[in-house]
Image (spheres, rainbow, N blue to C red):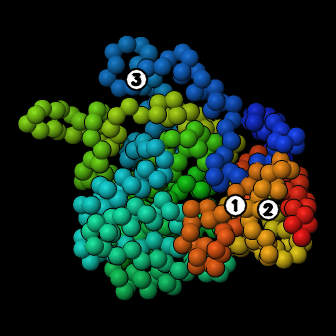
Amino acid sequence: MTHSSLPERIRRDFPILSRTVHGKPLVYLDNAASAQKPLAVIEAQREYLSNYHANIHRGAHHLAQLATEAYESTRQKIANHIGAYTTDEVIFTAGSTDAINLVAQSWGRTNIAEGDTILVTQMEHHANIVPWQMLCEEKRARLIPIAVHPDGTLDLDDLDQALRQHEPKLVGVVHASNTLGTINPVEAVCRAAKAAGAITVVDGSQALPHLAINMQTIGCDFYVATGHKAYGPTGVGFLWGRKALLNAMPPWRGGGEMIHSVSFEGTTYNEIPHKFEAGTPHISGGIAFGVALDWMNGIGLESIHHHETELVHHAQSALETIPNLKVIGTANQKVGVVSMVVDGHHPYDLGTLLDGQGIAVRTGHHCTEPLMAHMGLSSGTLRMSFAAYTTREEIDRAVIALERAINMLN
């Protein structure tokens, strides 16, 4: 089977892809915001809620044991999927934003002091900027951006200079940009940061559904990702951290599950990973997230990445034929994201007209306002983003619809 024929094998797994929007067959090109869900993921949540719903951990009855085993099996699947040494290094979170806030509020509040520096790249999602800004405001530390080249690649010379000049305590970098599609050389970034004595946080939200990931190869200290961009449910994700760091970090939230014992004289905390998992989690989502990982691995991350790379090349070639259109982000190594602007036309107007033709895209700043400001794009971009089920024919239809929208506005 060729990579271009990949969707033929899997589109039947996604019931939503057969629906219509405004009387037109749906073409869903908003996968960087959230991917659609295969039947196996939908069924996993239904099965839990229908047949063995119970709270997890400590329950003596059969349903609680079934739920605990299913939920904890996802922790093992995540560890296997990302090359973690042990499941103790995998913390369930509500998503990437929650995971980064955990690191900022636990590791950051303990280790960042007045006058310290944190580096992040200009292409970061707000989730890997705002938590550090809040921490820096509290601690009177500095947040300094690393520059991005006009083609959307990271300026490694600027990184090296900033590491030497500022001696940062922490470096945050996105593995793959949700706006540009750029796959960053996170291994090189982490090596350079480590040599400078900095801790590294990698945002893998856009990498998890597209790339094979291995913590030992990347060499970071913390890695975060979310389930809903990787064919899983919303409201669930994970933080991976080095065991020594996690053991040294204080809990962030207090409540049930994260404790060993409680009295009015004081509380002793649970061991990792549970000391960071206060309260009842999103159990059905956690179980279904594991099924989503199974689904991706059944298709094969290499096959998915090759297929999406072909789609990016096909889309960029087709879009080049449209007058006054400029693709934003032309790195050689990309995930399935193509952002663009059309001279004289607001992205939102184009996106609205595309929606009328059944084409779902995303418009605006994509939670990357500093990047948009750096690139001089005050109105943001129109973004098409692809998944394993996206076809060349859908891209062709979207390009034709975009040409029609431009002509209507002209």
- Residue type at numbered disc 3: Asn
Residue 40 in the image: x percent, y percent? Answer: 66, 30
Furthest residue to the top? 61
Q: Taking the image as drawn, is residue 307 in sight?
A: no
C-alpha span from label 3 to label 1: 40 Å
Q: Mark 2: which amino acid?
A: Leu
Image quadrant assignment for residue 340: bottom right
Say which of marks 3 and 1 sits in front.
1
For residue 55, the mark is 3
Q: Is residue 126 above or below residue 160?
A: above
| Residue type, label 1 | Thr
In the rendered image, residue 174, in percent from the top left (x then y), is placed at: 53, 64
Residue contact at pointers 1 and 2, CB within 8 angstroms: yes
Q: For numbered disc 3, what is the local secondary structure?
A: loop
Q: Position of residue 80 (x, y in %)?
A: 50, 43
Label 1, label 2: how far apart the Cα atoms are: 9 Å
* Residue bearing the label numbered 2: 350
Query: Which residue is found at the position 60% from the left and 23% from the top?
Result: 46
Residue 363 bears which disc, if any?
1
Measuring 75% from the left and 71% from the top, which residue is drawn there?
341
| Quadrant of the image occupied by residue 277 | top left
Q: Is residue 134 left or right of residue 66?
A: left
Q: Residue at x 39, y 81 (%)?
A: 163
Q: CA distance from mark 2 to mark 3?
A: 46 Å
> Does label 1 or label 2 sit earlier along the sequence?
2
